[in-house]
Image (tube, rainbow, N blue to C red):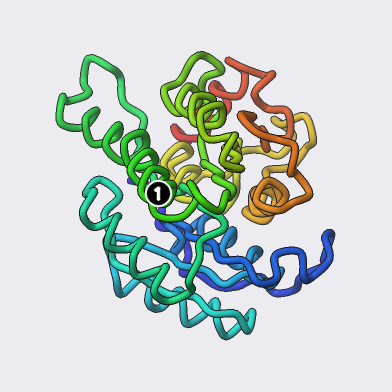
Amino acid sequence: MAAPVSEESCLDSYDYFFRPDLLAGKVAFVTGGGSGIGFTITEVLMRHGCNTVIASRNFEKVKKAAEKLEKCTGQRCLPIQMDVRKVNQVEEAVNLTLKTFNKIDIIVNNAAGNFLCPAENLSYNAIRTVFDIDTFGTFNMSKAVYNSWFKDHGGSIVNITATLSDGALPLQAMVKHLAVEWGPQGVRVNCVAPGPIEDTEGMSRLGRGVPIPPESTPLRRVGTRRDVADAVLFLASNASSYVTAQTLVVDGGTKFLGARMLANISRASKL
């Protein structure tokens, strides 16, 4: 049984690596922004002057998260109930965002559904759910915003992916295709691929609540949610205006450990 991730709270303190007004006047739509990495990504964007929209199937969760985020940053955060798998809900959410803020500058596709399971035990419905949320949900959100706003105004899309494979994953292939097709309209499409990140649902599931030993990573520490958020901030801002179709890996070098890292996770899960 995976250990529950602690209740969401804003960062205790915040040092600015980028200027505080880096995203002043911008609007970001963050799927899955009510918890985990998505919550901290939203907070960091807001701390740099950005108004946000956070969306989830659980409205009470995003409503409470939005209240916390507004209180700690002073920016606006609109909570919306939405399932990325349902195109009509996605389009309605995009329309509501445009009515509220009159623009969308940034999409962070963070909503995800994933778990570890041997292929022989993986049900057809389970694999369909993963693809529906991670791959098709990302496309649904990206296309809806492109058709409604990005096509005429440009924008930045940042997809949260993973480092579990360096092969031709569907999401990476989609990122490269959309970056090339939508580039002439001023749309940049990139990925952030987190490695082991503390206090997240992913690590809770992978390690079953048992911390990964810091000495098992090249940088001798497990990543933080802010590490990921700062990478998203860079790709969402004009600091990366000539960067597109790229995947920025934020894992402290652990992907180069390959089987060793997976072995550490496996050992931790059996303790």
Q: Can you tell which quarter of the image residue 125 is in? A: top left
Using the image as rendered, state which of residue 162 and residue 30 is in the foreground: 30
Residue name at image x 49 percent, y 75 percent: 77
What is the count of numbered marks? Answer: 1
Q: Can you tell which quarter of the image residue 14 is in? A: bottom right
- Image side of residue 170 versus residue 8, left or right: left
Residue 250 percent across, percent down from the top left: 68, 38
- Image side of residue 111 versus residue 242, left or right: left
Residue name at image x 54 percent, y 23 percent: 262
Q: In the rendered image, which quarter contains the N terminus?
A: top left
- Bin the neighbour count of mark 1 within 10 Å (Cα to Cα): few under 14, some 14-19, many 20 and up: many
Q: Please, what is the three-letter code of the amino acid marked with disc 1?
A: Ala
- Image side of residue 146 versus residue 183, left or right: left
Q: Secondary structure at mark 1?
A: loop
* 88 relative to 250, above or below: below
Residue 180 percent across, percent down from the top left: 56, 26
Residue name at image x 28 percent, y 66 percent: 81
Using the image as rendered, state which of residue 21 and residue 231 is in the foreground: 21
Residue 61 percent across, percent down from the top left: 35, 71
* 250 relative to 167, above or below: below
Using the image as rendered, state which of residue 224 and residue 178 is in the foreground: 178
Residue 16 percent across, percent down from the top left: 82, 65
Using the image as rendered, state which of residue 13 and residue 213 is in the foreground: 13
Residue name at image x 84 percent, y 59 percent: 17
- Label 1: which residue? 111
